[in-house]
Image: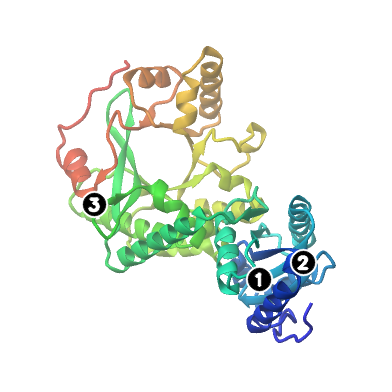
Amino acid sequence: MNKSYTDEVTGLPSFDTFSETVEADIKAHFSDTHFVYVSTDISNFKYINRIYGYQKANELLESLSKLMYDSDYGCRCACRTHSDHFIAFFSYEDSHAFEEYIERIDKSFSRKNARKFPSITLHLNNGLYFLNNPNESISLSFDKANVARRQSKGNYTVTSVHYADEMFGRGESDARVIATFDNALKNDNIAVLLQPKVDISSGELVGAEALSRLYDENGNLMYPDNFIPVLENSGKVVELDKYVLDVVCKTIKEWISKGYKVPPISVNLSRMHFYEKDMAQEIFRRFAKYKIPIEYIELELTESLFFADHEMIISEISKLRDYGFKISMDDFGVGYSTLNTLGTLPVDIIKFDKGFVRSSMGNDASFQIFKSLISVFNNINYEVICEGVETREQEKLIFECGCDTVQGFLYDRPIKIDVFEHKYLSDKNNKREGCCI
């Protein structure tokens, strides 16, 4: 490896020196050597800076540099481009063996630093680009490795991702989503919709979930599946959640002033919030400025969140409950929970995932398990909600299982706030009839 170190933190060369070294290496040895670029960053690194400080963060960068790039496993040259982003150039004999090496590095890095950073799940995002054209520019090869790295972000089961040509188009698509979101946020143009939660037996409105939608530059509706993963990977989902919380609080304040009977509204919080300093305090401070009763706001957190970075996240969730927020575990049944841990979690509401609800209706064994789970949760004083209800048959079976509260297209789709107000609050006679008793 080139020894003309310039980076003060890691002792690695500059990108210019890296590029010159790689270019010369390819010209001299491409005919008899296999080469691969590796682009790497550290998941949640900005939260390491915030929680543990820059000195500890720099020590982590130095640790990664020594572990990965000072090895004898074919590293020809490496550099730190900025922050926690590294690019390295390796020679290899067998691609499968090289991937196993990257996997060992990831596990070693996580294991070595887990005790030093207990509040963060450490994981390396690695993009691999196996060079097959010696005349390709260094910057293009670097971009391809970077595109692959971005595809690995947010997936803790994946150690590395290979570059494929179709990824470039996906990267451009992600960039358009982020640009669309930034523009919508700047211009107060994010659509916040409400989907009602209904009591089966009475047909009365008992709550609502706040959901968001974006519109592209042509005015076409963008659904959450198309933009939420991109915002999560970029960290911008935190800005979206805060925006939705502000809109909901303003709306509730207005409804109270009109004398409406206001239902509690649930707002989703992404995992990324929990890596911000004093997260619970920040959420409460944001809520408190609207001077509305706290029972009008519920916070929905995905099931997987309760089982990641357990100690730190559970602590922050407990603080949110101490402030008075009700906490809902969303997407229950996706596959993370175990019953022996559920009773210890700071949760008030269990929300069954729509896929789990539907699959439970498929055969008698699944239905009996579903029914037993609802009984268990009712017995330990959890509120239970089933989402994704689309038919009267599903509604009837859910009610027979002991669940009173439901959400789904059978009752209403997510609708604009003014439509929700007219349909469910200002028109007192617009109550659907209960169907099951």
Where does the image place residue 370, in percent across and percent down from the top left? Answer: 52, 22
Residue identifier under label 1 = 86
Q: State left or right for residue 156 relative to residue 250.
A: right
Labelled pair 1, 2 in contact (Cβ < 8 Å) = yes
Could you give the CA–CA distance between mark 1 and mark 3, rounded to whole angstroms? 53 Å
How far apart are the alpha carbons under marks 1 and 2?
Answer: 10 Å
Residue occupying image coordinates x 45% and y 57%? 169
* Place of residue 319 in the rendered image (x, y in percent of width and height, measured from the top left): 54, 55
Q: In this rendered view, identify the residue nearer to me: 342 or 331.
A: 331
**Mark 3 Cα within 10 Å, few/some/many (few <14, many 20+)?**
few
At 39% from the left edge and 31% from the top edge, which residue is drawn? 388
Callout count: 3
Query: Does 272 appear above or below 361?
Result: below
What residue is shown at x 36% (from left), y 17% (from top)? Answer: 393
Q: Of the residues tagged 3 and 2, which is closer to the observer? A: 2
Residue corresponding to mark 3 = 256
Judge by depth and name the residue closer to the eye, 397 or 376: 397
- Quadrant, the C terminus: top left
How far apart are labels 3 and 2 at the CA level? Answer: 58 Å
Q: Is residue 171 above or below residue 30?
A: above
Q: Secondary structure at mark 2?
A: helix
In the image, taking residue 167 as reference, residue 252 lies left or right, namely left
Residue 68, label in figure: 2
Give whichever of discs 1 and 2 has the lower sequence position: 2
Looking at the picture, which amino acid does disc 2 mark?
Met
Residue drawn where x is 50% and y is 22% of the image: 360
